[in-house]
Image (cartoon, coloured by chain):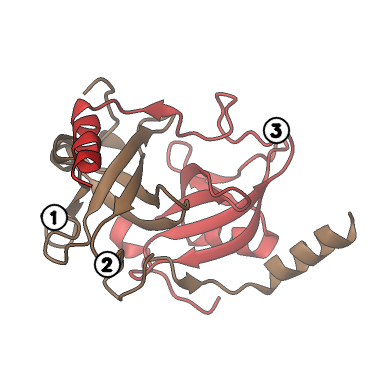
Chain colours: A brown, B red
Amino acid sequence: MKAEFDFEKMGGLLPSVVQDSTDGEVLMVGFMNRQALERTLEKGYVTFFSRTRQQLWMKGESSGNRLRVVSAHTDCDRDTLLLRVEVEGAGVVCHRGTRSCFTESIPTRSLEMIASASKESR
Amino acid sequence: MKAEFDFEKMGGLLPSVVQDSTDGEVLMVGFMNRQALERTLEKGYVTFFSRTRQQLWMKGESSGNRLRVVSAHTDCDRDTLLLRVEVEGAGVVCHRGTRSCFTESIPTRSLEMIASASKESR
């Protein structure tokens, strides 16, 4: 591994964004400790560290919806990861049966007002 | 705010993915405490909680490269956020002068080998 990473900032974990490499959809965020990252890069499939179970888990190992890593990047602080992946199996990432975990919209009137004001001023 | 969020899992912070709403590029990951999230939703511009400075900071407030929130989502665990934004100003998000903070590729021979084996088996 060429790059060194800042695992210290978050108690040994790097927040890791998983993005669909074909259409750019953000599918989930997981966490990797050093061992999970090494496993991910070695196997080419996303392995996280489960904070609740305190153990490694290869995403989709039992369901078949594994995340094949197409490319991996770190950011300017080296404390987060971006993994572009191809979703195998049924293409479902969330345990709720949806493609992405980010299904819950946060409703905000303020956002709508700002968007409409922005349009009017054009 | 309709949705309640799980701030407990990470000591009061939600990892927050910032994605360009037009082309889907993942620009950065920041962290929001409750106050930062409320400020973000109220103002319609991304405000983070800086872990190093231990204070709120509206991204791009001084540079002009503010992040206007187009949509906000939370995930199935309600412990992370996805913010689709329009980058104002010069459109630069990273302090290094690049559009995205995720500029550093993590080189892995294993990934290339897996990709090529995957192609051959098709």
Q: Which residue is mark 1?
A: A57
Looking at the rendered structure, the number of numbered marks drawn on it comes to: 3
Query: Is tag 2's residue or tag 1's residue first in the polypeptide sequence?
Result: 1
How far across and down, in percent of the image, does residue B46 sit?
Answer: 60, 52
Q: Give how far apart the Cα atoms at labels 2 and 1 are.
A: 19 Å
- In the rendering, at what x and y percent does residue A38 appear? 16, 35
- Residue at (80, 66) in percent of width and height: A116
- Rendered position, B119 above or below A55: above
Q: Residues within 10 Å of mark 1 (few under 14, many from 20)?
A: some
Query: What numbered label is drawn on residue B63?
Result: 3
Q: Quadrant of the N terminus of chain A?
A: top left
Amino acid residing under circle 1? Trp
Q: Secondary structure at mark 2?
A: loop
| Label 2 crowd (10 A; few <14 / some 14-19 / many >=20) | few
Residue pictured at 14% horizontal, 40% vertical: A43
Which residue is at the front of the view, A64 or B34?
Answer: A64
Q: Residue at x 39, y 67 (%)?
A: B75
User: Residue at position x 43%, y 66% from top?
Assistant: A102
Residue A109, located in which quarter of the rendered image? Answer: bottom right
Q: Is residue B100 visible?
A: yes
Query: Of helix, strand and loop, which one carries label 3?
Result: loop
Residue under pointer 2: A90
Question: Mark 3 or mark 1, which is nearer to you?
Answer: 1
Residue A56 percent across, percent down from the top left: 11, 51
Q: Of tags 3 and 2, which is closer to the observer?
A: 2
Q: Nearer the viewer, residue A63 or A56?
A: A63
Kindly identify the amino acid type of the residue bearing the numbered disc 3.
Ser
> In the figure, is residue A54 to the left or right of B56?
left
